[in-house]
């Protein structure tokens, strides 16, 4: 990885960029409102011709003053352009804000799950607790809160979670099933998407989904809908309770975007229990987006910023890890990594581990 090693800006660029950071909440909110109010859409619909301020006002039915300040902010942000006849058109960045699914998923997640709570980042760091989660209620972690979050926040949380794992699932299925595991443990199985994909991929496999009791109920309902209940079992537990053992006798343990929900000490403890759950010749498969294993700097940037969601909203002690920090935990729990494949789907790496 060659990012983040050298200064890349001139002094003028750096002071300009510092203003971007100073105004980041305005940049974010104005752009989001431009997107959600239909202003960007109406400008896109006008094509190369563009629209004047008055024409935009007419199309979106919002006050003239409000549309003007939003569009002027949008010029500075670079989501719209203006020509000599005062007609607004969409810039390339505006195009991605409006049409790119990843950008939309990230923006919805930041707005609906993180934005208000992020005001408590400083306290979260000092207290090692997700102090921002209190905007949703009195929960210790977001995972216990998930089934009870307001619908808009749930939708954006799942949209974000699924976006980053869904496209990787079909790519890694053949790798996980190379040795034909008969019994697979899916820890942090969430809505059951991975387990459903496994059950469809291999007609002989039996899968146990481990998750918090509230989440397991959601997964169970999903599995029933797919008519796969005969090959899927459920184990509702709080994995942080070290007195609760995992069921044993598995050929494969799967954890996707799961261990990043925990601190290094907790990761080691969970992996030690995976060690007990796994047959001696079995494999643990870990799919994680490591920020240092990305092809694009923007992907590393997104993961580094997502860590602050874990700090302020999720549980106050976890993050999107640098792979070296994570691999140390894997080794400390008695595993060796036999294969690491990076750049799967949008941002994932797959670690295949066996007992040392
Ligand atoms: C980020 S999601 C990943 C879901 C899925 N594996 C994927 O790749 O999309 C993390 C999952 O871990 C579960 N989880 C978090 N903390 C847990 C805990 N203490 N015990 C059991 N499951 C937990 C959450 O309920 C959630 O389903």
Image (tube, grey):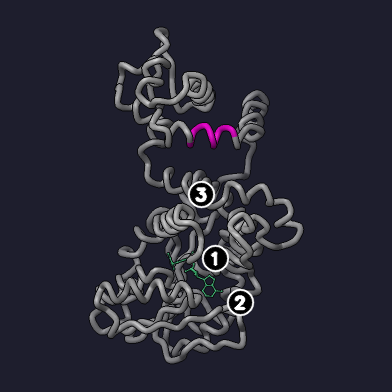
Residue at x 44%, y 90% (from the top left corner): 279
In the image, residue 34 above or below residue 260: above
In the rendered image, which residue does mark 3 sit on?
A: 112
Along the line of sight, the residue nearer the viewer: 255 or 309: 309
Q: Position of residue 168 (x, y in %)?
A: 36, 61
In the rendered image, which residue does mark 1 sit on?
A: 145
Q: Position of residue 248 (x, y in %)?
A: 46, 91
Residue at x 54%, y 55% (from the top left corner): 291
Residue at x 50%, y 44% (from the top left corner): 298
Can residue 74 be seen here? The reply is yes
Q: Is residue 295 magenta?
A: no
Tell me the number on the disc at residue 309: none
Mark 1: secondary structure: helix
Magenta range: 26-32
In the rendered image, which residue does mark 2 sit on?
A: 268
Q: Is residue 309 left or right of residue 299?
A: right
In the image, residue 20 above or below residue 339: above
In the image, residue 246 above or below residue 150: below
């Amino acid at each position: 990885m060659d990012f983040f090693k050298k200064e890349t800006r001139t002094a003028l660029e750096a002071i300009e960029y510092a203003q971007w950071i100073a105004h980041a909440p305005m940049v974010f909110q104005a752009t989001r409102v431009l997107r959600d109010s239909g202003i960007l859409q109406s400008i896109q619909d006008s094509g190369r011709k563009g629209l004047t301020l008055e024409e935009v006002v007419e199309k979106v039915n919002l006050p003239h003053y409000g549309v003007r300040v939003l569009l002027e902010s949008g010029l500075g942000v670079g989501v719209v352009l203006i020509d000599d006849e005062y007609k607004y058109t969409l810039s390339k960045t505006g195009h991605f804000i409006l049409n790119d699914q990843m950008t939309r998923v990230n923006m919805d997640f930041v707005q609906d799950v993180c934005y208000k709570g992020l005001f408590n980042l400083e306290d979260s760091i000092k207290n090692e607790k997700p102090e921002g989660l209190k905007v949703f209620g009195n929960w210790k972690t977001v995972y216990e809160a998930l089934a009870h979050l307001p619908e808009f926040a749930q939708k954006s949380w799942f949209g974000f979670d699924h976006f980053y794992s869904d496209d990787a699932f079909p790519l890694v299925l053949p790798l996980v099933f190379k040795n034909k595991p008969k019994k697979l443990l899916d820890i942090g199985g969430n809505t059951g998407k991975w387990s459903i994909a496994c059950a469809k991929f291999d007609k002989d496999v039996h899968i146990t989904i481990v998750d918090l009791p509230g989440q397991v109920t959601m997964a169970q309902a999903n599995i029933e809908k797919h008519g796969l209940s005969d090959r899927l079992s459920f184990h509702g537990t709080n994995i942080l309770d070290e007195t609760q053992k995992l069921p044993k006798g598995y050929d494969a343990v799967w954890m996707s975007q799961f261990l990043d929900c925990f601190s290094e000490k907790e990761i080691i403890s969970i992996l030690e229990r995976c060690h007990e759950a796994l047959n001696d010749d079995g494999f643990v498969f870990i799919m994680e987006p490591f920020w240092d294993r990305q092809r694009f700097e923007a992907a590393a940037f997104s993961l580094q910023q997502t860590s602050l969601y874990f700090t302020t909203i999720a549980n106050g002690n976890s993050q999107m890890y640098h792979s070296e920090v994570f691999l140390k935990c894997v080794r400390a729990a008695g595993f060796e990594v036999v294969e690491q494949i990076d750049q799967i789907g949008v941002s994932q790496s797959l670690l295949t581990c066996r007992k040392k």
